[in-house]
Amino acid sequence: MALDTTALRQAGVATDGTLAAAIDGRATIFEMTQAAEEAVLRPQDAGPWSHELRAALAARIAVLNGETDLATRYGQGAGAFADLADPADDGAAQGLTEVVGFMDKVAADTRNVAAVDILGLQAAGVADADIVRLAELNAFLAYQLRVIAGLRLMKGAFA
């Protein structure tokens, strides 16, 4: 297996063996997943959400989902926003209370996200296109976390 992606590394998939062979047969999926990570975390047009802030939010989402190793990986790119990776930080110091609250709710309490949450971001001055950017980041992390969990399950089945 020649692929080196975040999901495969975080799941602890070995580069040889039956699971590696199965993954090689689906290399395109993993390549596209890695490309999606790049597009969401380091887009050319980041809008108001810098690459560092996106990394901090990704780390925070990983922490909220019990993925501390993934949080550490993303936290390395958080720079001045590193404190936001800690769910105890409400974002007030950075003027991001509404954003952080929204991201936490989408990441950890998805079923209770409602129109009022979007209205809260709009009232805080967040443009619709920037709300979409936040949702994309959260959606990608949800997908990636599930891929990692699935790979771990497969790893056990192929052991």
Image (spheres, rainbow, N blue to C red):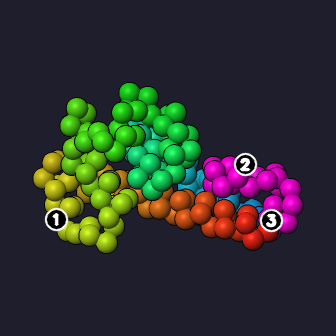
Question: For residue 2: magenta?
Answer: yes
Kind of residue at badge 2:
Asp
Specify which label sits upstream in the sequence, 3 or 2: 2
Specify which label sits upstream in the sequence, 3 or 1: 1
Q: Nearer the viewer, residue 135 or 11?
A: 11
Which label sits on residue 159?
Answer: 3
Residue beneath label 1, please? 116
Q: Residue at x 86, y 56 (%)?
A: 16
Residue 58, given in percent of the width and then of the height, sits at 45, 47
Q: Residue at x 51, y 46 (%)?
A: 68
The stretch of residues the image draws in magenta is 1-22
Residue beneath label 2, please? 4
Q: Nearer the viewer, mark 3 or mark 1?
A: 3
SS at mark 3 in the image: loop
Q: Quadrant of the C terminus?
A: bottom right
Q: Calculate the distance from the C-alpha at mark 2 to the C-alpha at mark 1.
A: 40 Å
Which label sits on residue 136?
Answer: none
Question: On the picture, is 54 further left or further right than 76?
Answer: left
| Dot 2 crowding, Cα within 10 Å, few <14, some 14–19, many 20+ | few
| Dot 3 crowding, Cα within 10 Å, few <14, some 14–19, many 20+ | few
Q: Is residue 42 visible?
A: no
Q: Residue furthest left?
A: 123
Q: Residue at x 45, y 41 (%)?
A: 55
Q: Nearer the viewer, residue 47 or 69?
A: 69
Check the image and report above or below for 101 versus 27. above
**Do residues under tags 3 and 2 come within 8 Å of each other at their CB atoms?**
no
Kind of residue at badge 1:
Val
Question: On the picture, is 112 further left or further right than 13?
Answer: left
Question: On the picture, is 119 further left or further right than 8?
Answer: left
Residue 90, given in percent of the width and then of the height, sits at 25, 42
